[in-house]
Amino acid sequence: MKGMAEIEFILSVFVFITTVSFVTSIVISNMPLFHSTSTSDTLKAKSWQYSEMLLLDEGDPANWQTLPFDEVNRIGLSTGKRYVIDQDKITKLAAFCLNPGYASVKNKLGLDIRNDIVIEVSYLDDSPFTGGSKIICGPSTVTQIRPRFQTVRLGILNNADKTIIRIKVIII
């Protein structure tokens, strides 16, 4: 009888350890999936946040496009009316990305060091707003390996034609 109790105990410990090992392996194998989903959600939120800031905020000060870069606190493309974009601000943002450079503009946008931002502006027919490239601001090299998320928003230019433009914000 004593031998039977030991065998039952050994079998129950074996079943318990096997069950715990199985559950642990399932949880560990799903960790990369959870991390990937979390990273994707973070990029999605940042992309939406920066598209909102560019599209709906005038910047600080509101006439930042007429000031030197050192006097600009925050960059926004709005005229003050919802979804109405100041074309002079788009042109000035593109100029600021060239001089003093992308890193300085990224700092004014408040983006942390782990992420990069690419801002594209184009007309609805996909032709670039600024003659050359649709990208008005972005890093000089963009990796294709890092995860990214883009938000596409539409706005109205403050010109006489009230032209509709597409603003694409890509967070990498």
Image (cartoon, grey):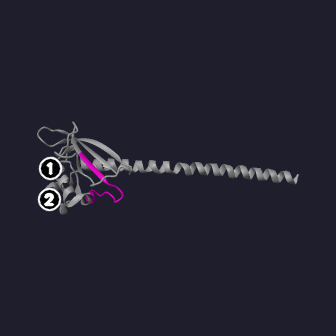
Which x, y percent locates residue 153? 27, 42
Q: How many marks?
A: 2
Q: Which residue is mark 2?
A: 67
Mark 1 and mark 2 in contact (Cβ < 8 Å)?
no
Highlighted magenta segment, given as a residue range = 106-120
Q: From where the camera sits, is residue 49 visible?
A: yes
Extreme residue toward the bottom, this view: 70
Q: Is residue 68 above or below residue 154?
A: below
Name which quarter of the figure residue 100 lies in. Answer: bottom left
The image position of residue 3, as x and y in percent, is: 86, 53
Local crowd at mark 1 within 10 Å, few (<14), some, or many (≥20)?
Answer: some
Identify which amino acid the numbered label 2 is placed on: Leu
From the viewer's perspective, tell me whether residue 110 is left or right of residue 26: left
Earlier along the polypeptide chain: callout 2 or callout 1? 2
Which residue is under mark 1? Answer: 88
The kind of residue tagged 1 is: Asp
